[in-house]
Amino acid sequence: MPEPLPEPLPEPSSQIGPLLELSGIDKTFGPVQAVRGLSLSVPAGEFVTVVGPSGCGKSTLFNMVAGLDEPDPGGVLRFKGRGCHAQELLGRVSFMPQRDLLLPWRNVIDNAILANEIEGADRKAARAKALRMLPEFGLAGFEAQYPHQLSGGMRQRVALMRTFLFERELMLLDEPFGALDALTRSMMQRWLLDVWERHRRTVLFITHDVDEAIFLGDRVLVMTARPGAVKLALPVNLPRPRSAELVTSPEFIAIKREILAAIEEESMKSFMSSGQAAGKAA
Ligand SMILES: Nc1ncnc2c1ncn2[C@@H]1O[C@H](COP(=O)(O)OP(=O)(O)O)[C@@H](O)[C@H]1O
Ligand SMILES: [Mg+2]
């Protein structure tokens, strides 16, 4: 018997307008304006990568879209064409936070089903489904292992599996490969694209690695220095499936040059403004 196919997701074409829209979003934490005038529109099925200087509000953006933080009043947030408060998105979006800690006392399967369990799903059915997904995530036979028995790449795959198991149209991944060495990282990138091509979710993916952003994305967003907004949205018209050699192609390098220039400009700005701040303090 062939494996049953994953549940069909709505066709991107059945979606009227973008899946997610942000317009003029601000977010302030006390004296710090993390995000200002952030606007962004994501059609269903798109893989959008986000790069920008550290501290520019990338995780803040995700926390708002995941429903954990409410933007300041005044901006517009829309999901499936309907204006909403951020908190209404809680549980409607799957989210892998930047510091996604697996629970050390739970084995691989029970870590993977955590979000489903919190949602009140039947634990036995969730476990069975997770078991079927293990091979796809390179974790076959590891169901009973605990996080400390796994390599860094495996732990990341468990966290990703948890995010995929919580089946939502929109998936937010905040620097999921940030802690991995270069080789594991590039393996994980190719693997993620493979999984994504089969499951076809809409993805927002934060990274500080420009190669990774281009290699994975249909579109790369470069954010400004804080307060964060979208500085540049660059389509990546490179064919899929993408192979490792792509990163040395002239098309890839041309895109990379443009992104690096935008980041450089923003990093300079944040460096100068922190320099001025230090100068004032001195
Ligand atoms: N919950 C919070 N309370 C106070 N300040 C915060 C909070 N979350 C983020 N910030 C501040 O907002 C800015 C943007 O942070 P963040 O979104 O984490 O940046 P990034 O993910 O781009 O590195 C930083 O100056 C950070 O200190
Ligand atoms: Mg962050």
Image (tube, rainbow, N blue to C red):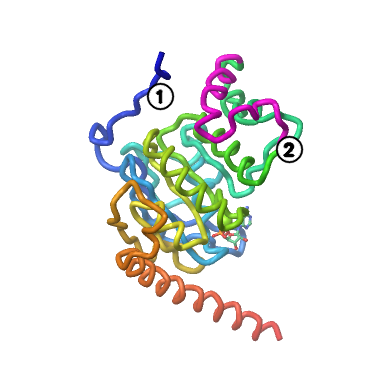
Disc tally is 2
Residue 255 placement: quadrant: bottom left
Which quarter of the rendering shows the N terminus? top left
Q: What is the x, y in percent for residue 147? A: 71, 37
Q: What is the x, y in percent for residue 274? A: 60, 77
Disc marking residue 149: 2
Q: Residue at x 52, y 27 (%)?
A: 133
Give the amino acid at mark 2: Gln
Q: What is the x, y in percent for residue 89? A: 47, 36
Main secondary structure of the magenta stretch: helix
Q: Residue at x 29, y 55 (%)?
A: 238
Look at the picture and state if 181 lies above or below 110.
below
Closer to the camera in the image, 267 or 7: 7
Is residue 148 among the parts visible in the rendering? yes
Q: Which residues are magenta?
A: 124-148
Q: What is the x, y in percent for residue 134? A: 55, 28
Look at the picture and state if 17 lies above or below 166.
below
